[in-house]
Amino acid sequence: MKAPDLTKWDIKPEIEGILLFAQLIDELLFDYTIDAYKIPALNSRTLALELLRSIEDYDANVLRKGAIRPIVNELVNRLAKDAVIQDIIGDYFGQYIDSLNKDQPIPELKAKVIFLINKLGDKYILTAKRQLKEAILNPKEKERITRLTRDYVIELIDKGYSPQFIYYESEKFIFSGRTPQKIDTPQIIDEYFNLFSAEKRTFHVIYRAGKSFSMIKGYSPNLGIEILEDTPELPFGGAEKVRAFLGKHDQCPLFLIVKNNEALDETIARALADQRLFLIDSLSRYHIHRGELQRSSEALVYSDDYKRFGVSRKPNSAVMKRPDRPFERLADLIKDTVTVITSDRLDPESFLRLVRALWRHNTAIRSEAPENQLLEFWSAVEVLFPPTAEESDRVLQIAGAMVCFESSEYAAKIAADLYKAIKNSHCAGALEILNEIPEGGNVIEKCLALFSIEKNEPIRNKFYTMFEKHPLLKNRVYYLNTRFASADLVLKTLNAHTERVSWQIQRIYRSRNVIIHSGKTLPFVNILVENLHSYIDRVLDLINEKISRSSHPTTVDQIVFEVKLESESHLHILKKLGKEKCTSDNYKLILFGNK
């Protein structure tokens, strides 16, 4: 979460809603936002589309019948909270959910899903925009603004916009661009909506290429690719970055023009061009394993009418959208990890499994295609969680184990992100106020005490006043208090989190099967890669931590069992405590259990 740049904002109470919306867009689409606050893979409408695709895959013998029920459960859960669909369906909304949730033959279920998809159509995004504007005009409805903003952005991505384009266009409109010159009314949301008219353009993409590409000059037109030795003449060629890109290049003297990419934005156009070149790379590797066709990572993308153009670097791969540690610490990090996994506390078989998982992790990082990244990460998961059940229960076994790692110290992960947001808020005195909290031996524990302990409400009120011009952070402190203030709330929060993670892991497994057995590319595969990368890193981190703290010999399987026991013990404690509120004496017990 970044502090908002308010240079062109006229801050007053009535624009709090539009500022919250602006900050949410920034956080949802920022590459390094933690997974708890990143854009989800699906909303209710696109989840219905996934259910239909999965039923069709079942009909084609690609998926098992057991893979269908978790999607139905997730869709029913989403629909119950979706005011947009309730608005569209109307009076029989409740009856529809009940009919969807019952056990029924697959053809009957399929008919009901098709009914929902046809009923929604383009009405979903139009209704979401209308409701979002209503909520923005009434800025007290912050949770509603949050939910509708997520659903709206997912719709834009499903329409064919890239997250990168939405992020940069939003940032330019809301914060850094010259137009609009001033934001002083929430009605400006209409101008924002007009940025995304869903009108496709034709783009051409130019790469610099090595001389080896001249070998394919004879058949490249069949792929819509033109290879030139002379600099192409373009009406915008005088622009500084364009001129530099088109200038002399010793290693890549040729110009590779991938033509006629129909897309809503430049990032998607480049991705389409990359796919065509990936085909050439694949053919090259098929025939000559040691050779390589060299081309630039930068590309010049321009529209057919020359009105839109720019030189862009290769977008961040999904596997790279994770916070990184400083490179200067690499030697110490490697030393610490090697010391732990080679210690006599870990048995040889577990050591080999960890090494194989790290190999798979490394291969995923180095892979270009997101489908390959997902397959390699999943291979690492299977190394760490080997089969102990029938194939039909396999994914449930894995999901059941992995959610325990994901929920372990979940509150600390949220508190660490909150501390980072407070630190980056640029609000003078914020850290001093945090230090007024008597509980906690470090800043993370103080953040935990801030949002969980009832008697710290006066300090929360200080933050609410301080963050008047930072509504996302102000609302985050309030939101976390409503989720972690008592044992029953923490239990509800953890159950909801583990349920979401379990559904996502099952979605990843289904996607893995579809990729392997049908070769299909899924529209949300990049988000799945980001989530799975986060999950596998958490598993590896916690295994490493458990080995280092163990006072006796252990194995990977023992650690998995121990993490599961800790998770079950924590949930048991929360059930036993009921509605007991967090206090200075018990907040760590409620948030983490007996650890």
Image: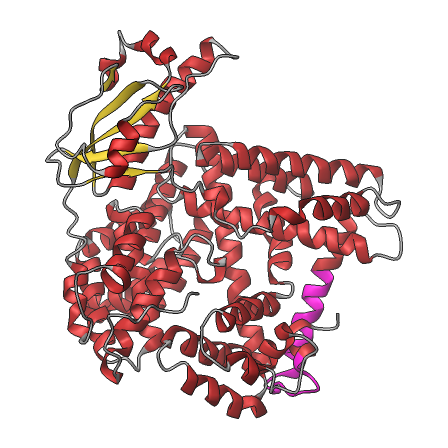
Q: Residue at x 50, y 76 (%)?
A: 480
In this view, 373 is above or below 528: above
User: What type of secondary structure mainly makes up the magenta span?
Assistant: helix
- The coloring applied to the image is secondary structure
Picture quadrant where residue 252 is located: top left
Q: Residue at x 30, y 53 (%)?
A: 168
Q: Report the side of 575 relative to 353 (left or right).
A: left
Q: Position of residue 433 (x, y in %)?
A: 54, 85
Q: Quadrant of the N terminus?
A: bottom left
Q: Nearer the viewer, residue 387 or 304?
A: 304
In this view, 10 is above or below 369: below
The residue furthest left is 305
In this view, 78 is above or below 455: above
Q: Nearer the viewer, residue 399 or 1?
A: 1
Q: Quadrant of the C terminus?
A: bottom right
In this view, 145 is above or below 103: below
Q: Residue at x 37, y 48 (%)?
A: 105
Q: Position of residue 510 (x, y in %)?
A: 47, 41
Q: Report the side of 268 relative to 260 (left or right).
A: right
Q: Nearer the viewer, residue 501 or 253?
A: 253
Q: Position of residue 48 (x, y in %)?
A: 32, 52
Q: Is residue 66 visible?
A: no
The magenta segment = 564-587
